[in-house]
Image (cartoon, rainbow, N blue to C red):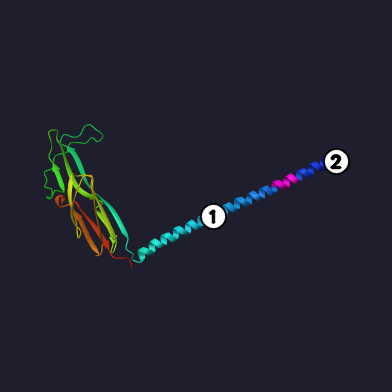
């Protein structure tokens, strides 16, 4: 008789434990589902915000609103090294190269250095980086000219004026691109190749 009571009591406790376990699982699942739902809603909200932001940018362009555009322009030069006897050592060995008997453009933009006692010679070209910039009519344009390679330059920007800049210095000019066409920037003592262009495109419809 006592054994039957014990068995019934154990079964009753087991049923209570099972029910409690089920309730805990259901509660946990509800919490997880709710959290996931919140995360999903947040992600959807962020996605909608990004889309809205992108539309705002596109709309601003489509409505012909002027944009502030900033560019960093570096003065650089490219060097080609060669040797009439060849370069036999170092990371970039090369065969012998004859010094060219050619005429380079005048203006200082190209410099051809004759061979030294070891036969080494070089060819240098001065340029801007970047040398092409694209903006739209009405944009507020800011150009930062940084002298990286070269002791000193005189630079002219069409419609703005001329200025000097030395190595390690930065000179800034700003203007409104009010006319469709091309604006040149160049170094008069490094012509004909140290020239850059700003393409001013018509306002988008």
The residue at 29%/55% (across/down) is 70
How far from the left and from the top, in percent, is residue 3? 85, 38
Is there a contact, CB below 8 Å, between mark 1 and mark 2?
no
Say if 175 sits above or below 105 in the image.
Answer: below
Q: Nearer the viewer, residue 43 or 108?
A: 43
Of 190 and 156, the residue lying toward us: 156
Which quadrant holds the C terminus? Answer: bottom left
Q: Residue at x 61, y 51 (%)?
A: 31
Residue 1: mark in rendering: none
Residue 168 lies in quadrant: top left
- Circle 1: element type: helix
- Label annotation for residue 40: 1
Q: Which residues lie in the magenta part? A: 16-21
* Circle 2: element type: helix
Question: Picture coordinates of residue 67 (x, y %)?
Answer: 32, 61
Q: Residue drawn at (69%, 49%), measured in percent from left and top?
A: 23
Mark 1 neighbour density, 10 Å: few (under 14) some (14–19) many (20 or more): few
Judged from this view, the residue extending furthest toward the bottom is 205
C-alpha separation, residue under disc 1 versus residue under disc 2: 53 Å
| In the rendered image, the vertical position of residue 118 relative to residue 131, given as above or below | above
Does 97 appear above or below 103?
Answer: above
In the drawing, does residue 43 fall left or right of residue 115? right
> Which class describes the residues within 10 Å of circle 2: few (<14), some (14-19), or many (20+)?
few
Magenta-colored stretch includes residue 171: no
Q: How many marks?
A: 2
In the picture of the structure, the residue carrying the numbered disc 2 is 4
Query: Disc 1 or 2, which lies upstream in sequence?
Result: 2
Q: Residue at x 53, y 56 (%)?
A: 41
Q: Where does residue 50 sit, x and y in percent of width and height?
A: 44, 57
Residue furthest out toward the top: 89
Magenta stretch: dominant SS?
A: helix
């Amino acid at each position: 008789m006592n054994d039957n009571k014990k068995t019934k009591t154990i079964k009753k406790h087991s049923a209570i434990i099972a029910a409690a376990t089920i309730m805990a699982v259901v509660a946990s699942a509800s919490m997880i589902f709710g959290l996931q739902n919140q995360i999903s809603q947040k992600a959807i909200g962020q996605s909608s915000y990004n889309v809205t932001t992108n539309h705002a940018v596109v709309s601003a362009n489509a409505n012909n609103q002027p944009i502030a555009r900033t560019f960093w322009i570096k003065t650089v030069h490219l060097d080609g090294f060669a040797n009439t006897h060849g370069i036999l050592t170092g990371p970039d060995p090369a065969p012998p190269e004859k010094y060219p008997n050619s005429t380079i453009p005048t203006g200082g933009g190209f410099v051809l250095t004759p061979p030294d006692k070891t036969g080494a010679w070089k060819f240098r070209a001065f340029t801007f980086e970047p040398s092409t910039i694209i903006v739209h009519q009405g944009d507020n344009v800011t150009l930062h000219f940084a002298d990286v390679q070269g002791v000193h330059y005189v630079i002219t920007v069409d419609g703005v004026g001329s200025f000097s800049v030395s190595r390690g210095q930065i000179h800034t000019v700003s203007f409104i691109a009010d006319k469709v066409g091309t604006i040149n920037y160049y170094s008069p003592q490094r012509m004909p190749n140290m020239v850059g262009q700003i393409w001013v495109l018509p306002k988008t419809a």
